[in-house]
Image (cartoon, helix red, strand yellow):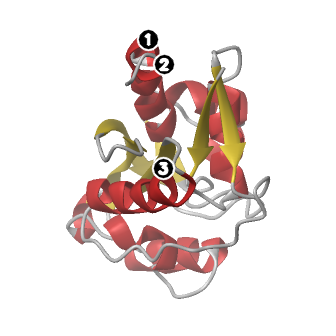
Amino acid sequence: MMKILIASHNVHKIKEFMQIFESTPIHLVSLKELNDHDEVEETENTFTKNAILKAKYFAKKYRMPAISDDSGLAVDYLNGRPGVHSKRYAGGNDYDNNVKLLNELKGIENRDAHFMSVVALYYPDCSYKTYQGVVYGTIGHELKQIDAFGYDPIFYPKGYNQSFAELGHLIKNEISHRALALKKVKEDLDEIINHK
């Protein structure tokens, strides 16, 4: 069975990765299992470059393939903000980010937005491949549930009248930006397993 390291400390992301790769010939290893607390600073200006940066660091450190995701929310009215700064948008936690975004959209009719995820799979031989997933939707008007990940409580995917947080992980793992990117990774399983 092939081992791939998840280059993230984010428990929500790790859980999504694990669920999507269940029943595949790939064994995902978390940094927690390795007792690794290294943080890679996301210094790049695109999701793709940040994803590669993180995967490259851990692939070289452990001489094993590493997979990483960088993702965020882009709001049309805000010219694509928060974008790569989604996680640190308000300088606080997820709740603060949601409140800041809702305040910026107060009274605004155009609430169109999309979540984007770029997954990078980096090999110890320095070759890599990236996969992109996008899900379109709108930003709600209120913060109904705060016990959720990221902007999930206020993002309503197109075709649904519930937010990501309300839909639950089973539906989210079918339609989310990260799920769509990871499904593309799964389509490459043969190529990944036979990588020389």
Residue 23, placed above or below residue 114? above
Residue 54, placed above or below residue 126? below
Q: Which residue is mark 3?
A: 68
Q: Position of residue 63 (x, y in %)?
A: 51, 49
Distance from the alpha carbon under mark 3 to that under mark 2: 17 Å
Within 10 Å of disc 2 (Cα), the crowding (few <14, some 14-19, many 20+) is few
Within 10 Å of disc 3 (Cα), the crowding (few <14, some 14-19, many 20+) is many
Q: Which residue is mark 1?
A: 190
- Position of the N terminus, as image quadrant, is top right
* Residue 82 appears in the figure: no
Amino acid type shown at disc 3: Ser
- Sequence order check: which comes first, mark 3 or mark 2? 3
The answer to the question of whether label 1 and label 2 lie on touching residues, with beta carbons closer than 8 A, is yes
Amino acid type shown at disc 2: Ile
Q: Position of residue 143 (x, y in %)?
A: 64, 64
SS state under label 1: helix
Query: For the point 36% across and 62% down, which residue is it?
Result: 53
- Sequence order check: which comes first, mark 3 or mark 1? 3
Distance from the alpha carbon under mark 3 to that under mark 1: 19 Å
Q: Quadrant of residue 148?
A: bottom right
Please indicate whether residue 29 sits to the left or right of residue 59 in the image: right
Amino acid type shown at disc 1: Asp
Q: Which residue is mark 2?
A: 193
Query: For the point 56% across and 24% down, which residue is it?
Result: 174
Distance from the alpha carbon under mark 1 to that under mark 2: 5 Å
